[in-house]
Amino acid sequence: MTPAPRPGALAAQARFVFQGTIKNVRATTLKSVPASARTVVARVDRVIQAPETLSGYAGHDITVELAPGERVRQGQTLIFQTTGWIFGDSLAVRSVGHEEATTPKVAGAAVHPEDPVGSLQAREAMTQASQADLIVTGRVRSVRVPNAEAQARAKAMAAGSTAERISEHAPVWHEAVIDVDETHKGAERRKQVVVRFPSSTDVRWYQAPKFQAGQEGVFLLHKQQISPTTARAAALTTLKAPEYTALHPSDFQPLERLPQIQLAADASAAEPKPPATGTAARRARSRRRRRSKGGR
Amino acid sequence: MAARRRSSRAGRRIARGGAKLAGGQVLVINMVPRSLSSETNQDSEPSITVNPARPREIVGTAFTGDPMGGPLAPVYLSSDGGNTWRLNSVVPSRAGSALGTGDISLAFGTTGHRLYGGILRDPSFNFETLRGTNAMAAMQTLASRPDNDQPFTHAISKSGRDRVYIGNNDFQAGPQTATVDITANGRVANPAFRSIRIEPRATAGQDGPQIRPVAHPDGTAYAAYYGWRAQSGSFPGNTLVVTTDVVVVRDDPAGLGANPFRSLVEPSDGLPGRLVARNVRIPFNRNGSSSTGQQRLGGTLSMAVDRRPGRSGTVYLAWADQAPGSILTIHVRCSTDRGVTWPAADLLTVLNATNAALAINSVGAIGLLCQQLTGTGATRRWVTHFRLSSNGASWADLVLCTAPASTPAKTFDPYLGDYDHLVAVGRDFYGIFSANNTPDQANFPNGVVYQRNADFATRRLLALDGTTPVAPSIDPFFFKVKG
């Protein structure tokens, strides 16, 4: 019997999902990975979901380490959900679970069937949406340095000193003021919301959205993503509720992704909301229609 | 057709400045494995450790995330002396992390195969002390605390014990933040690390992030740090300039006594810590810019002790300051009396350079790895040098890499890293640096081997299919110089 993909945290970690055919059992493609009862060589027939770097593996043989108790046979064509293991001359992954590669299952395995990278990005956006405290569509009206920090810096510089710890990893917080078109998740109904984001391009912060005036889209906002201790270490002031932050690269999304985000937000909310019917949703639908007609 | 060029040619070594790389041979390897031929990450800020008990086992690190975003961050692992590399995820991180880990520095014990380290863990950036039972094993977090920067690990084994030293800039100890965490024996089940505050003087609110410990088998332990004394300009405005002392501290009982690192006293103020250079100025950049070759600058510091028996008094120090006409100037000096006196003149001065890393091999030869910015405007290049001297007086110069400084455009700061790394095991030097990965033989005058697909004829990186072009990025490069 073929075990279904394991639910929960392990399956959620599977970022490389592919349809593959088992070429050899008790075999590997890497010298550094000894063959065992749990290693098989699979030909990747089709990449269903993957980060950009691994999206080109169709047609290549890779090593799959089966989970304890997982069984496969030579010649089977399966959908594998996997996490990384060894990246060497060849690739070795760890199976989180597999299922038969029937046509409906293959079709249903990806958000964007012909775009494994887009499928992964969509999944990550939906994960962020389910964790967000507030989701709004709108437009960045302005970007500014938080007032308290600006005053403290000016005072310190005038005194010939500095008001903050100097670290390469300092976030250098900025605030974006967002004019809200519509709220898609969260109890607050405001015409404007202020989101704090790191303007730093340091390795710690560069992936966080860098908002600019005029930017329009879906904002996935979170309360208190960093501890007060860490906030104190990194900046002049700690965050005060109900200030929001956007730290994950998926915390800003184009309007086109709103329907998927809405679904994820609804699923995560205590009382699911009906599909968005407001301005932003209409705008997103209108854009999709224009695209389907070849317009922009 | 993808071409993987093996072109290590000792006969083409560039040797300038008198000294020869006698009997030497250099091997330069692009460490990104073939299975990741499509990657375009900025794999900067590398460090390396070689297992002294099994020198063919080498671990490298960089800002390289798990390609599949797993819960552990990868290290680069070689089991054949650096000829081939693979990624193995063993460092604590978080599921979905693209970064993998913040600052990371690992070190093998001299014996016993254990791997120790300090990281700034993603996403909290807490300073975590790590231990792995071997290079392949997932590392265990021994301790964790917030408000820290740039852990830098050194380990040495004696009598079946692993002494582990991790320099770190501990903001919780502010304003005297320079700290070395030490355990007398990392092998026990729950080793206790003690945080030694090594800055006795008033600071400008904090010390610099580079705190570099090094130890000799006889128990002598040193550490060097930038003692920040004044600041001007603005960090957020990218105009900050720091006035700093360059300080060396020493402890004769291995940093394990009641009041460690007070063995060296500065005659001018009677305080622990010899002031090797006083009131020098360094830029402390928020961002790199075109004028700095995209690299942010914030000083550089490295120290090495002669580990031969009876030579613990010989210690080399490299630091940088800013002088007119040079973005940063590296100075190398040597003390032969346990850090008590330091000559006023440099043994070696390198203009427009950063990322100094020193090591001393088993016959007392001193190696310096550094990265120098040459040219102006669009012709700027980052030139990575390995300098070698048998006596500190004359230095051979081996150019490992010379590549345009304007491409690829940086993804984040730091472009090349706030440090690179050099170690010596036996007579051999092992180093790691990050650089533009364009497969151009002219960029590697002493040869290079690529694991990832590359076509040197067209100077293009190629994807896994061997035909699709891949954009240049910053990769880690391993090198070995046989002593």
Image: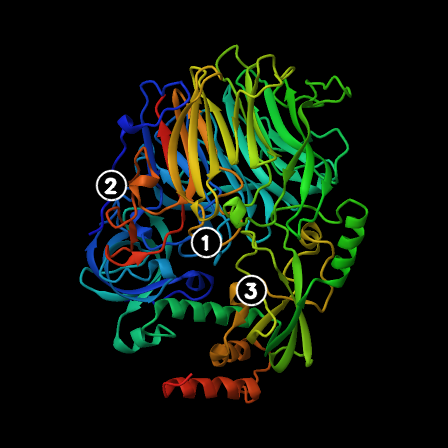
* Mark 2 closeness class: few <14, some 14–19, many ≥20 residues within 10 Å: some
Residue tagged 2: B5
**Residue B70, x across and y down, in percent:** 44, 55
Query: Which amino acid is tagged 2?
Result: Arg
Alpha carbon separation for disc pair 1 and 3: 19 Å
Residue tagged 3: A209
**Residue B238, x across and y down, in percent:** 64, 50
Query: Which amino acid is tagged 1?
Result: Ala
Relative to B459, residue B129 above or below = above
Relative to B28, residue B34 above or below = below
Dot 2: element: loop
Tag 1 and tag 3 share a subunit: no
Q: Nearer the viewer, residue B377 or B294?
A: B377
Q: Which mark is residue B409?
A: 1
Tag 3 and tag 2 share a subunit: no
Query: Which amino acid is tagged 3?
Result: Pro
State if disc 1 and disc 2 touch (CB < 8 Å): no
| Quadrant position of the C terminus of chain B in the picture | top left
Dot 3: element: loop
Label 1 marks which chain's residue? B
Of the numbered discs 2 and 1, the one sitting upstream in the chain is 2
Q: Nearer the viewer, residue A138 or B239?
A: B239
Alpha carbon separation for disc pair 2 and 1: 26 Å
* Mark 1 closeness class: few <14, some 14–19, many ≥20 residues within 10 Å: some
State if disc 3 and disc 1 touch (CB < 8 Å): no
**Residue B311, x across and y down, in percent:** 52, 12
